[in-house]
Amino acid sequence: MLSFLLIILVSIFFMGLVIRTKSLASGRKGPGILQPMKDIVRLWKKGSVYSTTTSIIFRIAPTVYFSSIIMAILMIPHGNQPGIISFGGDFVLFAYILALGKFLMIISALDTGSSFEGMGASREALFSMLVEPAFFIIMGSLALFTGHTSFYDMFSVLNYGSYISYLIGALSTFVLILIAMIENSRMPVDDPKTHLELTMIHEVMILDNSGFDLGVILYCTPLKFAMYGALIANFFIGSLPLQISLPLFFAIQIVFAVTVGILESFMARFRMSHNPQFIFILTSVSLLIFFGVLLVLGKFI
Amino acid sequence: MKYLTIHNNQTVNIKDIPVFTYREFLEENIVLLKGQAKKHCVNYFGVNDNLQIKLYCCIADDDTHEIFINSSIINIADSIPSLSAQNHNFEKFEREIHENFGIKYTDHPWLKPMRYANNRANKQLGIADYPFYKADSEELHEVGVGPIHAGIIEPGHFRFICNGEQILHLEIQLGYQHRGIEQLFLQKTKLLERATLAENIAGDTTVGHTSAFSNLWESLCDVSSDKSLQFSRTLALELERIAIHTGDLAAICADIGYQLGNSVFGRLRTPIVNFFQEWGGNRLAKGLIRPGKINYPFTKELAQRLKEIFIAYERDFNEMADKFFSLPSVLSRLEKTGIVSYEEALEIGTVGMVARTCGLNRDIRSSHPSNLYGDLFNHEPIIKHQGDVYSRVKLREEEIQQSILYCKKLLENIPEFNKAENTEIKPGNDKFTLSLIEGWRGEICHCAITDEQGNLKAYKIKDPSHHNWMALAQSVRNNEISDFPVCNKSFNLSYSGHDL
């Protein structure tokens, strides 16, 4: 329960921090920290417009997408406080409940019949598919390392003994940051600021969504960021007492947001055909983690 | 003589231009251009004359600074062979003649309406009936973009035929910005009205088009322009080049998602356009260039201001440009994207910046100089050879540096400015004038023909975008569709300059 509340809290100011970082990096003052959230609330107050070519899929997809993320968040623990849903192998459900939401977004984009949205849907499907192995290799390695298969058990017994375990923590953080960037269609894989449909991935899929639906979809981005941020925080929190783990949690989320902002400020977006190569890097880094775990356990000499 | 030889901004009598039968005319011009990279057609158009069309063909020779003109008279009902079948330079020109007068070409390879002009011959079909090239395939798909632009620029329709993410073919359909500028030139008889029309041909090339118009008008009316007018036109042209190139660099940064470059270059454009405001009261230099006079003298104080602006500009610009051209993520987006080969550029007849990035030396400032070019300084065009987006971006950066040098040189010697006077100037009778100028985008060509009373009979404008749009369509072939925006921006062609 604690973790759920914390993630919702962080999601309110996360995008504001990213945007403020980007503004400062380009020499501007930037909007207030809560501005992105205010924009979303403004959209929530509006009704949606539906194209006559769309079906029920298009109408339910934003809600399903949103609920899938909420459900995934329910599984995230906070140190030694378990998530609301917690059982052996819950990380598999975590990955596939997110995939379910994404699947509905993809078919709802196809549902509109627009050639742009079809293009975006195909890109989104490809990149999400390439990210999946990296996530499972990390989680599998952690399960092997700790001997448990639920988020809560894994993170609460995760302790840093040898140097290699520090390496595993650092590498996992790196991979999770990049997974979060890719899943949220941020730089360097996709440019969230562009106005050009031909270069978009996620934004082009939601061109036909409006009003409340659009607000729900837009709110999913900070939610997902905060969720991955919480996962990263768990690598460091372990079984620390609350008075240390709470400030640490917020510090990690803020550092995460600033990192995202800096990454987006000082480099150009990748060429679309270079994206798969880039995403494969994540899988290879996860494999490094896997071998690290095997080394620690002495199963691989 | 097979043609009349003139120089830039020279006025001649129409009766001196030789008239041939169409067959001779065709052969003569094809032979003149064959295998000649140094010659290209700057304007080819028809003038309606009682069910007969008089065709004028103007070919510029970059080596000798000469322009060759000849003409031919055909009947509207004629079916004639096209020049385009043998030389693709004429493709757009003949499409325009076909559209405006209904001339039937028997062997034109791509005979489609050009801009659906208001005074076109065939009014049955509208802009929605444009015959797009189609691919009959299960695997390929079409993506249509526009005519409403997603951002802030002008309307145009782009139809892609793609294989997945790869573009196989792009067809660009324009005409949505058509205002009938050439007709308005004939209807509006006051000089101020015409000058205002000229500055609105393409809003981003105000100085280029008004300078071309002013040079042409002064030549047509046989008045000499004094040093102060030439000085202000040259300076304004170079300032416009700096401002628009900087803005383009910012827009290219935005298209590749490079935020730092976008905000720094975007900011640097402002002091330059604001200087136009200080000088002539308008950030886009509207009202600055006028035939026969200038209302805003360039003072010593303005020169001092401009020098200060350049000091601040150069410091930030050089730092940002160094960073930009050494950033791997930027280079990987720009290099080998959207390539136009030398052969393609030659075949299309590209001009200006686009030609110069493909190794084709076309720059009116050195080949047909006017105003202070070739007088105060001899312009050395910057040439790039790869023809990709990187070349076009790098060319902009180097041209900015070059233009700043030219401006500084101009500031060393500011001529006396006389008080602007409204003198009545009138064009000569039965005259033909052609004016070429190198705008920031490339060669601008204005042609005027007067009748026996000295009234305008025809006014013909050719913006550099006229030919270069085809270069864009060719450059994106086999590129990723997601790279189209950055390719498009690297050309930055004008919709209104094409549609007129």
Image: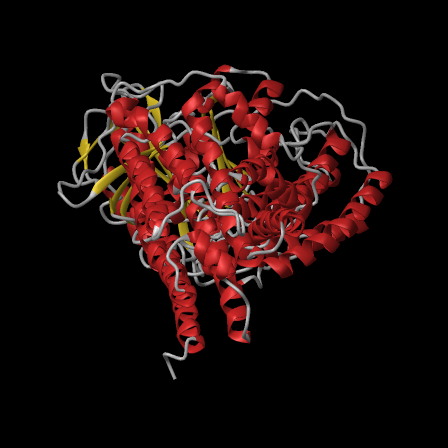
Residue B256 visible in the current orientation? no
> Between B233 and B71, which is closer to the camera in this rendering?
B233
On screen, B202 above or below B254? above
Residue B92 is left or right of residue A186, and the answer is left
A259 horizontally vs A178: left or right = right
Camera-side residue of B237 and A263: A263
Q: Image height check: is B310 above or below B421? A: below
Q: How many labels does the image show?
A: 0
Query: Residue A213: percent from the left, percent from the top?
Result: 41, 25
Tell me what residue is drawn at x 70 percent, y 43 percent: B235
Q: Nearer the viewer, residue A212 or B257?
A: A212
| Farthest bottom residue in view | A301
Q: Where is residue B103 in the image (x, y as percent from the top left)?
A: 23, 28
Given the current orientation, which residue lies at the most extreme right position? B301
Residue A187: x percent and y percent? 49, 49
Q: Which quadrant, please, contains the C terminus of chain B? A: top left
Residue B146 % position (x, y):
36, 30
Is B439 displayed left or right of B225 in the figure? left
Q: Residue at x 39, y 53 (%)?
A: A150
Residue at 49 percent across and 22 percent down: it is A43
Query: B357 or B212, which is in the foreground?
Result: B357
Q: How is the image coloured?
A: secondary structure
In the displayed structure image, the side of residue A276 where residue B369 appears, left or right: right
Residue B54 in view (yes/no):
yes
